[in-house]
Image (tube, grey):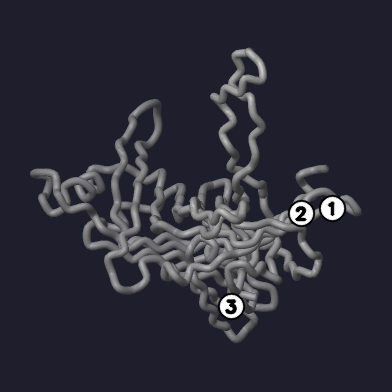
Amino acid sequence: MLHQTAAISLGRQSAKGTAAATYVRGRTTSSRVFPRYDRTDNTAEHTGVHERPTSRQSTAIRNGYAEEVQFTSRLYPLMLPHALMMAGFTCSTAAGGDGSYDHTLTLAAAASQTYGSVLHALDEGGSRFTRKVADVKLSQLTFTANKQGVSYSGTGLGLSQATASGSETVAAEVDYLISAYSGSWTVTSNDITANTLGTPQGLTMAINNPLQEDDQNLTTMSRANLVSTGIDISGTASGLTFSEAILREWHYGSNAGTSLDQIIPVSQLSWVWKSPAEIPSVSGKFFQVTVTIPITQGFMQPVDITGGGRILYDLNWEMTDAISTAPITIVVRNNKSTYAAD
């Protein structure tokens, strides 16, 4: 059994308890789907069966379980909306009229967050088997962009697992990598000068969606729900060029260098990642991901001066949800017509 023969697919459910019927199979570099058990504590009992000083004198049993789901993929355009919806986003689709579609993903209301399903296949030929995990949410979805490319990783839990029926419809991810070097980076701010800040050499974004996972009814081994306890989004822009001008903007603000400013600089961040090649049969349009965060607070990290070369620094940023409109919008352009639940 070779890992190159494995496959993981994501799908959107219409309701909790009803597994998805249609999926997108990713082009992943790693994947894991495995049950995580709760079990009774069988230590520190004195049974009188013997007189040996051992810790475990009774047999433990399983009290409950949840399905752990993990995957990492380079950034391709079709599976990503499923991952974002499993991390707490909702999706609306607009047709471009030319075979392209823009899927706009924004944070869902707490009661509207949906579950997804995962297919995980192992082995090959007549020995191949596929497990289906239903009622999955992602507790974290992280993105990394650097000179090695753009990738994303998901970690989450599912409530139930079964053998796949074989009737599921699975579409393959397209072989069109999305790149940061074909895109753009935009900073809009009254506190920081975009040209002084410059363009980072690396970028990360972490969507943290911690799940309350202790809801379990006494009559079943599976969890009853996976409830999001609050989404937090943050990241890092790394490899920025250090200068006196940017140091003053980050730390002194309008105080002109006389004293440290109480006000934390605020910026709108927006970036585009897109494919070098056009969408097939769609002239002038590319597979792309556009991220816009209207309000971020930035934190310049300390500069460690060792060795030679230019002095660079990293910037940590945090999304702030201080407006009535969407605090983050992610638009995925591809040639898939719908991500409607089934």
Q: Position of residue 12 (x, y in %)?
A: 61, 69
Which comes sooner in the sequence, label 3 or label 1?
3
- Residue 242's x, y, as percent? 31, 42
Relative to 341, say whether 194 is above or below: above
- Is any part of residue 250 visible from this angle? yes
Q: Tag 3: residue type?
A: Tyr
Measured in 3D between alpha carbons, the distance from the residue under mark 1 to the one under mark 2, in whole angstroms, is 7 Å
Q: Secondary structure at mark 2?
A: strand
Which quadrant of the rendered structure holds the N terminus?
A: top right
Q: Nearer the viewer, residue 95 or 167?
A: 167
Q: Are marks 1 and 2 in contact (CB under 8 Å)?
A: yes
CA gap between label 3 and label 1 equals 34 Å
Mark 2 or 3, nearer chain start: 3
| Residue under the image location 27 percent in, 62 percent down | 189
In this rendering, is residue 152 above or below 105? Answer: above
Residue in the image at 56% along x and 53% along y: 218
Residue under label 3, please give it: 101
User: Please, what is the three-letter code of the amino acid marked with disc 1?
Assistant: Arg
Precedes in sequence: disc 1 or disc 2: 2
* Image mark for residue 128: 1
In the image shown, does 303 or 87 lie closer to the viewer? 87
Disc number for residue 121: 2
Using residue 203 as the reference point, say whether residue 262 is left or right of it.
left
SS at mark 3?
Answer: strand
Residue 44 higher or lower than 12, as above or below: above
Query: Element under label 1?
Result: loop
Rendered residue at 49%/51% (across/down): 214
At horizontal 61% and vertical 48% (from top left) the residue drawn is 65
CB of mark 2 within 8 Å of CB of mark 3? no
- Mark 2 neighbour class, 10 Å CA radius: few under 14, some 14 to 19, many 20 or more: some
